[in-house]
Image (cartoon, grey):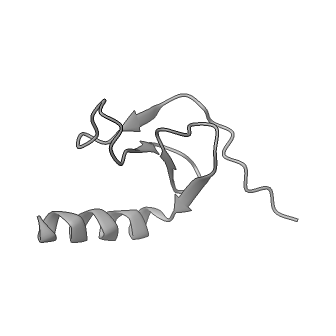
Amino acid sequence: MTDRTIAVLDGWRKSSYSNDEGGSCLEVLDHHPSGVPVRDSKNPHGPALLFSAAGWSAFVRALKADA
């Protein structure tokens, strides 16, 4: 069985679109060897999604193009 735990706990950064008013917030972890982990900033000990670097870049480009 493959271990899917994201062991690195330091270095998460919050989206620049997040605020302290309890809105939808996410955090990403840069420089992770397996890809780009993304988690809900309101639940930092909960699960994280792991995107490939290419998948994450495509997602961010799509968001910026739609803005």
Residue 44 visible (yes or no): yes
Against 23, residue 58 (above or below) is below
Viewer-proximal residue, 41 or 6? 41
Q: Which residue is drawn at 31% across and 70% down?
A: 58
Residue at the image point whose x is 22% and y is 66% from the top: 63
Q: 47 above or below 10?
A: below
Quadrant location of the C terminus?
bottom left
Numbered circles on residues, count: 0
Along the line of sight, which residue is nearer the eye, 56 or 46? 46
Residue drawn at 88 percent across, 65 percent down:
1
Task: Tell me residue 23's x, y (percent).
Answer: 32, 44
Q: Which of 45 and 36 is in front in this view?
A: 45
Where is residue 53 shown, x and y percent of the image?
Answer: 44, 62
Q: Where is residue 46 in the image (x, y as percent from the top left)?
A: 63, 44
Residue at the farthest right position: 1
Q: Can see residue 34?
A: no
Where is 4 relative to 9, above or below?
below
Q: Residue at x 53, y 57 (%)?
A: 35
Question: Is 53 left, or right, of 23 in this rendering?
Answer: right
x and y percentages locating residue 4 in the rendered image: 73, 56
